[in-house]
């Protein structure tokens, strides 16, 4: 018996663009299986807000009622990039039915910074740091 969740997800899975992702020290790569797609006319890759979107628009060229199990229509897949990804370095290539999207990674992930807190209501308006403090010798 098919579950309600299975029925809801079936249309999404039927039109999903199959992908694989991997990362090394320098780059993050997405590979999408898109056999039979004309990369010039039917394929686009967009990057925005830390996400890569792969979109395909395949038009059915048949003029009669021939049998076909090929998929036609609009297909879209969006993948979140890692935090270290440098959006401006995204490159895409298409070869033998495989789209490969690669983005360079920054050397280190951006990390937060310590914000000093200005203490009000005291003479002198002292500022204290919330970051790690050097060890102070204990009185004996």
Image (cartoon, helix red, strand yellow):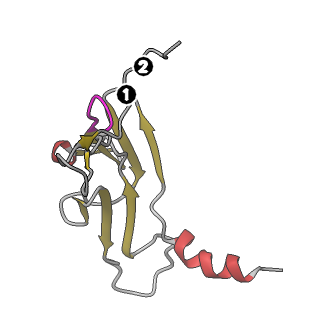
Q: Residue at x 48, y 56 (%)?
A: 18
Q: In the rendered view, would you say 3 is above or below 83? A: below
Could you tell me which secondary element the residue under label 2 belongs to?
loop
Q: Residues within 10 Å of mark 2 (few under 14, many from 20)?
A: few
Whether 107 is among the magenta residues is yes
Labelled disc at residue 76: none
Horizontal and vertical percent for residue 34?
Answer: 39, 56
Q: Are marks 1 and 2 in contact (CB under 8 Å)?
A: yes
Position of the N terminus, as image quadrant, is bottom right
Front-most of residues 79 and 33: 79
Q: Distance from label 1 to label 2 (Cα)?
A: 6 Å
Identify residue for label 2: 135
Q: Residue at x 48, y 71 (%)?
A: 15
What predominant SS class does the magenta segment belong to? loop
Q: Which residues lie in the magenta part?
A: 104-109
Question: Is 7 positioned to the left or the right of 15 in the image?
Answer: right
Q: In the rendered view, would you say 23 is above or below 4? A: above
Horizontal and vertical percent for residue 65?
Answer: 45, 87
Q: In the rendered view, would you say 75 is above or below 65? A: above
The quarter of the displayed image where residue 128 is located = top left
Q: In the rendered view, would you say 103 is above or below 65? A: above
Identify residue for label 1: 133
Question: Is 80 positioned to the left or the right of 116 in the image?
Answer: right
Front-most of residues 122 and 90: 122
The quarter of the displayed image where residue 64 is located = bottom left
């Amino acid at each position: 018996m098919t579950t309600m969740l299975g029925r809801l997800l079936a249309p999404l899975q039927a039109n999903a663009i199959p992908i694989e992702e991997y990362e090394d020290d320098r780059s993050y790569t997405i590979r999408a299986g898109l056999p039979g797609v004309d990369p010039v006319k039917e394929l686009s890759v967009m990057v925005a807000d830390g996400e890569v979107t792969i979109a395909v628009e395949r038009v059915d060229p048949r003029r009669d009622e021939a049998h076909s199990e090929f998929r036609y229509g609009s297909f879209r897949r969006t993948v979140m990039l890692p935090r270290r990804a440098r959006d401006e370095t995204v490159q895409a290539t298409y070869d033998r039915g495989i789209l490969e999207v690669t983005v360079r990674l920054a050397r280190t992930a951006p990390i937060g910074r310590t914000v000093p807190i200005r203490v009000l209501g005291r003479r002198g308006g002292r500022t204290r740091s919330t970051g790690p403090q050097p060890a102070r010798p204990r009185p004996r």
